[in-house]
Protein backbone atom coordinates (compact mmCIF):
# COMPACT_ATOMS: atom_id res chain seq x y z
CA UNK A 1 0.00 0.00 0.00
CA UNK A 2 2.85 2.35 0.82
CA UNK A 3 4.44 1.86 -2.60
CA UNK A 4 1.33 3.12 -4.45
CA UNK A 5 1.22 6.38 -2.44
CA UNK A 6 4.89 7.10 -3.27
CA UNK A 7 4.27 6.63 -6.99
CA UNK A 8 1.40 9.15 -6.92
CA UNK A 9 3.82 11.69 -5.40
CA UNK A 10 6.36 11.17 -8.18
CA UNK A 11 3.70 11.51 -10.86
CA UNK A 12 2.46 14.73 -9.27
CA UNK A 13 5.99 16.20 -9.17
CA UNK A 14 6.66 15.11 -12.77
CA UNK A 15 3.41 16.69 -14.00
CA UNK A 16 4.22 19.95 -12.15
CA UNK A 17 7.72 20.06 -13.70
CA UNK A 18 6.27 19.49 -17.21
CA UNK A 19 3.68 22.24 -16.65
CA UNK A 20 6.42 24.60 -15.38
CA UNK A 21 8.61 23.93 -18.43
CA UNK A 22 5.64 24.42 -20.77
CA UNK A 23 4.77 27.71 -19.06
CA UNK A 24 8.35 28.95 -19.36
CA UNK A 25 8.39 28.09 -23.08
CA UNK A 26 5.07 29.90 -23.59
CA UNK A 27 6.32 33.02 -21.78
CA UNK A 28 9.56 32.98 -23.82
CA UNK A 29 7.61 32.63 -27.06
CA UNK A 30 5.30 35.49 -26.10
CA UNK A 31 8.29 37.67 -25.18
CA UNK A 32 9.94 36.97 -28.55
CA UNK A 33 6.72 37.84 -30.37
CA UNK A 34 6.40 41.14 -28.50
CA UNK A 35 10.02 42.07 -29.30
CA UNK A 36 9.50 41.24 -32.99
CA UNK A 37 6.32 43.36 -33.03
CA UNK A 38 8.09 46.34 -31.43
CA UNK A 39 11.00 46.06 -33.85
CA UNK A 40 8.62 45.90 -36.80
CA UNK A 41 6.63 48.88 -35.49
CA UNK A 42 9.83 50.89 -35.03
CA UNK A 43 10.88 50.12 -38.61
CA UNK A 44 7.44 51.15 -39.89
CA UNK A 45 7.55 54.43 -37.96
CA UNK A 46 11.05 55.20 -39.26
CA UNK A 47 9.98 54.41 -42.83
CA UNK A 48 6.99 56.77 -42.54
CA UNK A 49 9.15 59.57 -41.13
CA UNK A 50 11.73 59.03 -43.90
CA UNK A 51 9.00 59.13 -46.56
CA UNK A 52 7.66 62.40 -45.12
CA UNK A 53 11.17 63.93 -45.11
CA UNK A 54 11.67 62.83 -48.73
CA UNK A 55 8.38 64.48 -49.69
CA UNK A 56 9.55 67.67 -47.97
CA UNK A 57 12.82 67.64 -49.95
CA UNK A 58 10.88 67.11 -53.16
CA UNK A 59 8.51 70.01 -52.41
CA UNK A 60 11.47 72.27 -51.62
CA UNK A 61 13.23 71.25 -54.83
CA UNK A 62 10.11 72.11 -56.84
CA UNK A 63 10.34 75.69 -55.53
CA UNK A 64 14.02 76.15 -56.40
CA UNK A 65 13.60 77.29 -60.02
CA UNK A 66 11.55 80.28 -58.78
CA UNK A 67 13.81 81.42 -55.95
CA UNK A 68 16.41 84.08 -55.40
CA UNK A 69 18.29 84.85 -52.20
CA UNK A 70 15.40 87.09 -51.02
CA UNK A 71 12.47 84.71 -51.61
CA UNK A 72 10.37 83.47 -48.67
CA UNK A 73 11.52 80.50 -46.60
CA UNK A 74 15.14 81.03 -47.47
CA UNK A 75 16.72 81.59 -44.14
CA UNK A 76 20.40 82.29 -43.63
CA UNK A 77 21.65 79.75 -41.11
CA UNK A 78 23.11 82.50 -38.89
CA UNK A 79 19.63 83.98 -38.35
CA UNK A 80 18.16 80.96 -36.57
CA UNK A 81 21.13 78.89 -35.47
CA UNK A 82 21.77 75.37 -36.56
CA UNK A 83 18.20 74.21 -37.17
CA UNK A 84 19.07 70.54 -37.56
CA UNK A 85 19.42 70.48 -33.77
CA UNK A 86 15.99 72.03 -33.18
CA UNK A 87 13.37 69.84 -31.43
CA UNK A 88 10.30 68.44 -33.18
CA UNK A 89 8.11 71.15 -31.62
CA UNK A 90 10.15 73.86 -33.40
CA UNK A 91 9.65 72.15 -36.75
CA UNK A 92 5.91 71.78 -36.15
CA UNK A 93 5.53 75.51 -35.41
CA UNK A 94 3.77 77.07 -38.41
CA UNK A 95 6.30 79.93 -38.62
CA UNK A 96 9.42 77.78 -38.53
CA UNK A 97 9.20 75.95 -41.84
CA UNK A 98 6.93 75.68 -44.83
CA UNK A 99 4.23 73.09 -44.32
CA UNK A 100 3.58 70.57 -47.04
CA UNK A 101 -0.19 70.20 -47.21
CA UNK A 102 -0.71 68.28 -50.43
CA UNK A 103 0.22 64.83 -51.73
CA UNK A 104 0.99 63.35 -48.32
CA UNK A 105 -0.64 60.01 -47.62
CA UNK A 106 -2.43 60.06 -44.28
CA UNK A 107 -0.35 57.23 -42.81
CA UNK A 108 2.98 58.94 -43.59
CA UNK A 109 2.90 61.94 -41.27
CA UNK A 110 4.01 65.57 -41.13
CA UNK A 111 6.45 67.05 -43.67
CA UNK A 112 8.14 70.46 -43.51
CA UNK A 113 11.09 72.06 -45.24
CA UNK A 114 13.40 75.02 -45.05
CA UNK A 115 15.51 76.29 -47.92
CA UNK A 116 18.59 78.16 -46.88
CA UNK A 117 20.76 80.17 -49.22
CA UNK A 118 24.41 79.16 -49.07
CA UNK A 119 25.99 81.66 -51.45
CA UNK A 120 26.78 82.86 -54.97
CA UNK A 121 29.80 82.34 -57.21
CA UNK A 122 29.84 84.72 -60.21
CA UNK A 123 30.94 83.51 -63.66
CA UNK A 124 32.98 86.61 -64.51
CA UNK A 125 34.98 88.69 -62.05
CA UNK A 126 35.14 91.81 -64.26
CA UNK A 127 31.40 92.59 -64.01
CA UNK A 128 30.88 94.98 -61.02
CA UNK A 129 27.34 93.64 -60.43
CA UNK A 130 27.58 89.91 -60.99
CA UNK A 131 24.41 88.36 -62.34
CA UNK A 132 25.55 85.25 -64.15
CA UNK A 133 26.84 82.51 -61.93
CA UNK A 134 25.95 79.78 -59.51
CA UNK A 135 23.62 80.15 -56.53
CA UNK A 136 23.82 77.39 -53.94
CA UNK A 137 20.91 76.27 -51.76
CA UNK A 138 20.41 73.66 -49.09
CA UNK A 139 16.99 72.14 -48.46
CA UNK A 140 16.39 70.60 -45.05
CA UNK A 141 13.39 68.29 -45.01
CA UNK A 142 11.72 67.25 -41.75
CA UNK A 143 9.52 64.17 -41.53
CA UNK A 144 7.49 63.13 -38.48
CA UNK A 145 5.55 59.87 -38.44
CA UNK A 146 1.83 59.97 -37.56
CA UNK A 147 2.55 58.01 -34.39
CA UNK A 148 4.75 60.94 -33.24
CA UNK A 149 7.55 58.58 -32.31
CA UNK A 150 10.03 59.00 -35.12
CA UNK A 151 11.43 62.02 -36.87
CA UNK A 152 13.97 62.24 -39.67
CA UNK A 153 15.94 65.19 -41.06
CA UNK A 154 17.31 64.99 -44.58
CA UNK A 155 19.34 67.64 -46.38
CA UNK A 156 20.04 68.13 -50.05
CA UNK A 157 22.33 70.62 -51.73
CA UNK A 158 21.46 72.24 -55.06
CA UNK A 159 23.15 74.56 -57.56
CA UNK A 160 21.14 77.02 -59.61
CA UNK A 161 23.10 78.39 -62.57
CA UNK A 162 21.88 81.73 -63.97
CA UNK A 163 22.55 82.56 -67.64
CA UNK A 164 21.99 85.87 -69.40
CA UNK A 165 21.28 86.30 -73.09
CA UNK A 166 21.16 89.60 -74.95
CA UNK A 167 17.72 89.05 -76.46
CA UNK A 168 16.09 86.93 -73.69
CA UNK A 169 15.43 87.15 -69.96
CA UNK A 170 17.78 85.24 -67.72
CA UNK A 171 17.42 81.49 -67.62
CA UNK A 172 18.11 79.14 -64.74
CA UNK A 173 19.36 75.59 -64.64
CA UNK A 174 18.91 73.75 -61.34
CA UNK A 175 21.17 70.79 -60.55
CA UNK A 176 21.08 68.36 -57.64
CA UNK A 177 24.49 68.03 -55.94
CA UNK A 178 24.18 65.81 -52.86
CA UNK A 179 21.99 64.63 -49.97
CA UNK A 180 22.51 63.27 -46.48
CA UNK A 181 20.51 62.07 -43.51
CA UNK A 182 21.20 64.40 -40.61
CA UNK A 183 19.23 62.63 -37.85
Image (cartoon, rainbow, N blue to C red):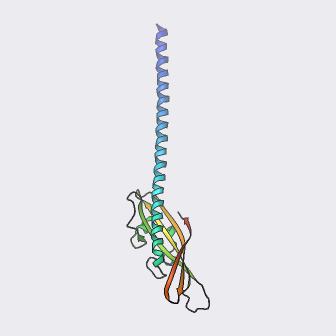
Residue drawn at the location 41% of the way across and 63% of the way down: 110
Question: 67 above or below 153?
Answer: below
Res. 86 in view: no
Residue 14 in view in this figure: yes
Q: In front here: 32 or 121?
A: 121
Residue at the far front in the pictured view: 167
The residue at 49%/41% (across/down) is 32
Along the horizontal axis of the image, is 101 left or right of 167?
A: left
Q: Is residue 57 left or right of residue 125?
A: left
Where residue 52 sits in the image (x, y, percent)? Answer: 45, 62
> Which residue occupies the foreground of this view, 66 or 28?
66
Where's residue 13, x and y in %? Answer: 48, 21
Picture coordinates of residue 113 (x, y %)?
Answer: 45, 70
Which residue shows up at 43% across the image and 79% down it?
Answer: 72
Foreground residue among 88 and 141 = 141
The mark tally for this picture is 0
Vertical arrangement, residue 166 with respect to residue 142, above or below: below
Q: Residue furthest right?
A: 125
Q: Quadrant of the rendered structure where residue 130 is?
A: bottom right
Residue 58 in the image, given as x and y percentages of width and height: 47, 68
Residue pushed farthest top? Answer: 1
* Relative height, residue 157 to residue 12 (above, below): below
Amino acid sequence: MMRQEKSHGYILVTVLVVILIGSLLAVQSLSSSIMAYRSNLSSHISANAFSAAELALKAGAERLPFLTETAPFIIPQQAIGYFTEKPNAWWLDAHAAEIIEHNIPEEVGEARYIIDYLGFIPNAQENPIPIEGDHFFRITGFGLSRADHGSILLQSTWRQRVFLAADKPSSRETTFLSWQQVR
